[in-house]
Amino acid sequence: MTLEATIAFLDRDFPQMHAGGRSYHLEAVGPLSARMRLDGHERHLRPGGTVSGPAMMALADYALYAAILANLGPVALAVTTNLAFNFLRRPGPGTLVAECRLFKLGRRLAVGEVAIRSLGSEDIVCHATGTYSIPPER
């Protein structure tokens, strides 16, 4: 799927991701890859003024899903079966960028990783790996 088609699918089938205002922005898709941005708002912060773990977890999961969609097509029932996170350093408040790449995109499983950085920094603040189950064709 193109970037525009992937965004349209996500907006149509998962409008809840934009409850309270649009924060997640799919910026690029490519062969086995996607890039997504989280514009951090007050609702994404935890005490101490850092972007919360749950906000970064949602960003990583959403970026993985977008990469899978862009490469397989509109498979709404692809589901997360495993996610693992390593929080490496504390991001300040603000925008985060997730770079996703898929290692495997098979008929039944997709496996990938996501590196999350603060906008403008090369330092990874969170590294995630995930597996999705792809539903059988009907």
Image (cartoon, rainbow, N blue to C red):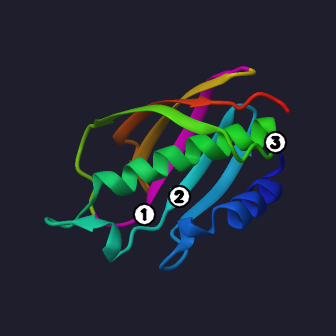
Q: Amino acid at mark 1?
A: Thr
Which is nearer the N-term, disc 3 or disc 2?
2
Q: Are marks 1 and 2 in contact (CB under 8 Å)?
A: yes
Q: Picture coordinates of residue 61 (x, y %)? A: 50, 45
Q: Nearer the viewer, mark 1 or mark 3?
A: 3
Q: Considering only vertical position in the picture, is 24 above or below 58?
A: below
Residue receiving disc 1: 95
Mark 3–mark 2 distance (CA, rounded to whole Å): 21 Å
- Horizontally, is 124 left or right of 12 in the view? left
- Horizontally, is 111 left or right of 83 in the view? right
Q: Picture coordinates of residue 92 (x, y %)? A: 27, 60
Provide the major secondary structure of the magenta segment: strand
Q: Amino acid at mark 2?
A: Arg
- How crowded pointer 2 is (Cα within 10 Å; few <14, some 14-19, many 20+) is rated as many
Q: Amino acid at mark 3?
A: Gly
Residue receiving disc 3: 73
> Does the stretch in magenta take in 137?
no
Q: Residue at left 36%, top 66%?
A: 94
Residue receiving disc 2: 37
- How crowded pointer 1 is (Cα within 10 Å; few <14, some 14-19, many 20+) is rated as some
Q: Residue at left 38%, top 51%?
A: 56
User: Magenta segment range?
Assistant: 93-106
Q: Picture coordinates of residue 74 (x, y %)? A: 79, 46
Give the quarter of the figure containing the C terminus.
top right
Q: Are marks 3 and 2 in contact (CB under 8 Å)?
A: no
Q: Judge by depth and name the residue closer to the eye, 56 or 27.
A: 56
Q: Are marks 1 and 3 in contact (CB under 8 Å)?
A: no
